[in-house]
Amino acid sequence: MTSEIREQEVIIRTERGLTIAGTRITIYDVIYYLKAEYPRKYIRDAYCLTDEQIDGALSYIETHREAVEVEYQEIMRQAEETRQYWEEYNRERFARIAAAPPRPGSEALRLKIMERRMRREAKKKK
């Protein structure tokens, strides 16, 4: 019972979903890193969490695995729909930007960027 009370204190439901209390970090953020096989310490440090917060989040995820996984999949589906919407919405705009001639006076900057890009590509091939 003590761990359940601690979980409830650490994990709260907000308009963003299941959130680590006192932060804007959701359980879904933590799950994303867990699925990518990042270690606990990395996740804790990446989000500036305390040991109690990360332990509470991991415990909650483990205890409520099925329900959390269902919510996570729904969040990921919504994120993909949103990404596709904005990609389509901005398609013409990005095409216009790409087709626009360079601004006058930016030739030197463009040349410098291209040189760095070519050096980076050459390093990758080595």
Image (spheres, rainbow, N blue to C red):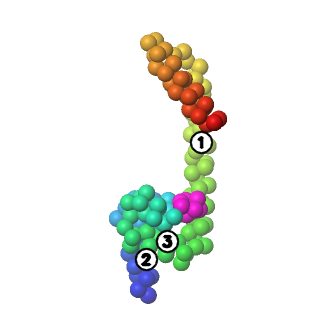
Q: Which mark is residue 63?
A: none
N-terminal label among 2 and 3: 2
Residue 86 in view of the camera = yes
Front residue of 54/71: it is: 54
Q: Amino acid at mark 3?
A: Leu
N-terminal label among 3 and 1: 3
Instruction: Classify 119 as above or below 30.
Output: above
**x then y, percent, for residue 9:** 38, 75
Separation of marks 3 and 1 at Cα, in angstroms: 33 Å
Mark 1 packing: few (<14 Cα in 10 Å), some, or many (20+)?
Answer: few
Q: Circle 2 is placed at which residue position?
A: 7
Range shown magenta: 32-38
Q: Residue 50's image quarter?
A: bottom left
Q: Circle 3 is placed at which residue position?
A: 58
Disc 2 secondary structure class: helix
**x then y, percent, for residue 97:** 55, 23
Instruction: Classify 83 as above or below 64.
Output: above
**x then y, percent, for residue 84:** 61, 43
Observer-side mark, 2 or 1, equals 2
Instruction: Classify 126 as above or below 53.
Output: above
Quarter of the picture holding the C terminus: top right
N-terminal label among 2 and 1: 2
Mark 2 packing: few (<14 Cα in 10 Å), some, or many (20+)?
Answer: many
Q: Amino acid at mark 1?
A: Tyr
Front residue of 88/36: it is: 36
Reply yes or no: does residue 98 show up in magenta. no
Residue ranking furthest to the top: 104
